[in-house]
């Protein structure tokens, strides 16, 4: 386990990852560019409406990218998370209930989110990754600006090899307690009985006093995830949603909409008696007690998406509505409305690295030696192979995936396409895999092709009998490495492109191989047990196997930078929010890291709430 010892302040200082507010004002002069992919809503704005859904309007006078609102007990203030300081950079603001008077409360390079106002209005509790990247519950005294971390204690965090995040704080009516959820001391677990790479989440509900004492568990159910607790007006009960641990995978995947169900549950804090307030289908989340004794909640996804009530009162059906919160008098409801159009290619993102600007790009990007980009337009198109110059000009579809006979629904879900295109060293050829990937690889075919950069000369390299993909050219252009997946066929293979002879490089559950810029090593991801993936390198002749990462949270999707370092996606700090509340994502806990080729000098270079991956550094010419 290598969670903490290499994350020293000296190593992090150049990246300004946990900066004071002043450091968030970044220098305009940048030395380079990193392209990366992000899976997150493209738009998110706060709205307010009457309780029956009528009179809907934008909440804020200056509406930008906001979410996770909360209302003060007197109904005069709203706190919310905003990314107005940069795409991916979440800070906490407040505004008057009429949407005016917007002002920052918590700023900085860390992820700050999910604030709740104390009953007296003098403090907020919120989630933050400041001071070490773990999600903890913090309290801000608004008048003094004093910040206190409530959960960063060994006896509270539990086993650091396991998940240990803390989410969604809520004040008790008397201000003496803060309830929240946590996955502390729960094992890492993949979906589909650990077959899947992506993690599920098991949450319990806890409480702590605002001074950090009195930590205790309020509610737990084995193999379930309990989320988004709210106190009853008298402080004697809590209400929350309850979903199976396995269901937290389907709750964030569009192909499972309508098939995942959860219930709204209430627990009496004195007796511990649990009572289900709902039954039947539907993904029901973020409940809240209302002044009339009813409980409102969100139905997420499906034909009934919108606001619903335990009493059976008429629902308010409204698509893409998320995280509702009712005002204390019950007359109004505030929520965010999200959109899922893809970010424009090259859209500027917030950068946690003062030496580079971050920009959005589609998946599997790679740069040829002549400076041409290639990538799969999985989010911006139909999962075809596309080339363009780094300034966005000269865009060409080199291979149209629609001609590959793929299932359009699998392409739309991101499970099929022309994946991981890779350049030859002379910049004239592109090799790629065409077919079915990820969860569909066991039953779907995938074949490797190469094609000239002008779209001619398409050549099939594998026969399709074994799912083959994720290829990479050797430095001399005479061979490729790729992975196979099938009955009795696992691991990495190297093909001689002249003779088409194939030799076995590895026989383990290995994936995503890539030749280093000097051609001397191959980086790849290996599944080492039922839930854990790690980054390895090996020589092309099969010697000198090296394991570079050691963490229970999984590491993968490793790629080389042009200067011979390795970038990859890591889950070691776990989820940044309750998994069931995300949309259209796979690994929303994934953040981008970089290390030297020998595994030294590991450090994290993104710190957002969202799934960040697929990095590509452009060669530094400045």
Image: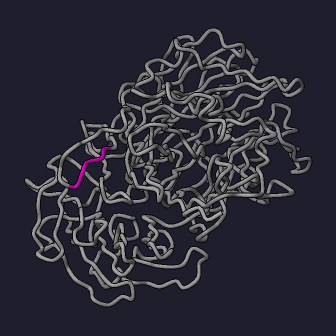
Asked whether 380 or 355 is in front, the reply is: 355
Residue drawn 36% across the image and 25% down it: 222
Q: Residue furthest left?
A: 488
Span of residues in magenta: 536-540
Colour mode? Answer: one colour
Instruction: Name the main secondary structure of what is drawn in magenta.
Output: strand
Quadrant holding the N terminus: top left
Quadrant holding the C terminus: bottom right
In this picture, residue 334 sits left or right of residue 361: right
Give x and y (percent) for residue 359: 61, 62
Asked whether 4 or 160 is in front, the reply is: 4
Q: Is residue 575 above or below residue 347?
A: above
Tag count:
0
Q: Residue furthest top?
A: 214
Q: Residue furthest right?
A: 101
In this picture, residue 117 sits left or right of residue 464: right
Give x and y (percent) for residue 14: 65, 40
Give x and y (percent) for residue 173: 74, 22
Asked whether 409 or 477 is in front, the reply is: 477
Q: Is residue 304 visible?
A: yes
Residue drawn 56% across the image and 49% down it: 610
Give x and y (percent) for residue 601: 49, 37
Rendering quarter of residue 148: top right
Residue drawn 83% across the image and 54% down it: 60
Q: Is residue 279 above or below residue 620?
A: above
């Amino acid at each position: 386990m290598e969670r903490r010892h290499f994350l020293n302040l000296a190593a992090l200082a150049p990246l300004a990852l946990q900066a004071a507010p002043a450091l968030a004002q970044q220098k305009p002069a940048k030395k380079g560019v990193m392209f990366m992919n992000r899976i997150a809503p493209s738009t998110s704005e706060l709205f307010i409406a009457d309780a029956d859904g009528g009179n809907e309007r934008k909440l804020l006078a200056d509406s930008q990218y906001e979410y996770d609102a909360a209302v003060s007990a007197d109904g005069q203030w709203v706190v919310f998370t905003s990314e107005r300081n940069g795409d991916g950079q979440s800070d906490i603001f407040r505004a008057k209930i009429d949407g005016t008077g917007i002002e920052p409360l918590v700023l900085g390079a860390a992820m700050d989110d999910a604030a709740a106002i104390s009953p007296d209005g003098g403090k907020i509790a919120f989630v933050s990754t400041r001071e070490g990247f773990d999600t903890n519950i913090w309290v801000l005294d608004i008048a003094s600006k004093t910040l206190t971390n409530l959960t960063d204690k060994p006896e509270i965090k539990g086993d650091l090899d396991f998940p240990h995040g803390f989410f969604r704080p809520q004040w008790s009516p008397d201000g003496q307690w803060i309830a929240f959820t946590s996955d502390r001391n729960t094992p890492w677990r993949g979906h589909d009985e650990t077959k899947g790479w992506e993690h599920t989440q098991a949450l319990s509900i806890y409480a702590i006093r605002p001074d950090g004492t009195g930590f205790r568990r309020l509610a737990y159910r084995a193999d379930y995830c309990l989320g988004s607790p709210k106190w009853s007006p008298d402080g004697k009960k809590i209400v929350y949603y309850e979903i199976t641990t396995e269901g937290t995978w389907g709750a964030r995947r569009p192909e499972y909409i309508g098939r995942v169900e959860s219930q709204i549950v209430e627990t009496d804090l004195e007796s511990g008696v649990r009572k289900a307030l709902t039954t039947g289908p539907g993904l029901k989340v973020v409940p809240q007690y209302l002044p009339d004794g009813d409980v409102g909640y969100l139905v997420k996804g499906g034909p009934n998406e919108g606001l619903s009530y335990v009493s059976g009162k008429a629902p308010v059906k409204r698509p893409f509505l998320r995280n509702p919160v009712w005002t204390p008098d019950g007359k109004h409801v505030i929520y965010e409305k999200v959109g899922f159009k893809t970010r424009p290619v090259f859209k500027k993102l917030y950068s946690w690295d003062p030496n580079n600007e971050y920009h959005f790009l589609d998946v599997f990007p790679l740069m040829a030696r002549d400076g041409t980009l290639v990538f799969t337009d999985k989010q911006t198109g139909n999962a075809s192979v596309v080339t363009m110059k780094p300034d966005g000009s000269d865009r060409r579809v080199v291979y149209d995936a629609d001609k590959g006979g793929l299932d359009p629904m699998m392409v739309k879900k991101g499970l099929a396409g022309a994946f991981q295109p890779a350049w030859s060293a002379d910049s004239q050829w592109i090799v790629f895999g065409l077919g079915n990937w990820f969860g569909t690889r066991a039953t779907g075919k995938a074949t490797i092709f190469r094609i000239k950069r002008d779209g001619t000369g398409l050549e099939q390299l594998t026969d399709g009998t074994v799912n083959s993909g994720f290829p990479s050219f050797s430095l001399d252009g005479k061979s490729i490495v790729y992975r196979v997946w099938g009955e009795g066929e696992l691991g990495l293979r190297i093909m001689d492109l002249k003779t088409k002879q194939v030799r076995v490089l590895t026989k383990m559950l290995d994936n995503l191989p890539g030749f280093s810029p000097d051609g001397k090593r191959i980086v790849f991801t290996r599944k080492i047990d039922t839930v854990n993936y790690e980054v390895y390198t090996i020589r092309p002749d099969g010697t000198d196997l090296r394991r570079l990462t050691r963490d229970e949270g999984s590491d993968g999707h490793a790629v080389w930078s042009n200067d011979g370092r390795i970038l990859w996606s890591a889950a070691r700090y776990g989820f940044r929010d309750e998994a069931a509340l995300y949309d259209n994502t796979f690994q929303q806990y994934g953040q981008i890291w970089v290390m030297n080729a020998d595994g030294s000098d590991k450090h994290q270079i993104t710190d957002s709430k969202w799934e960040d991956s697929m990095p590509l550094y452009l060669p530094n010419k400045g």
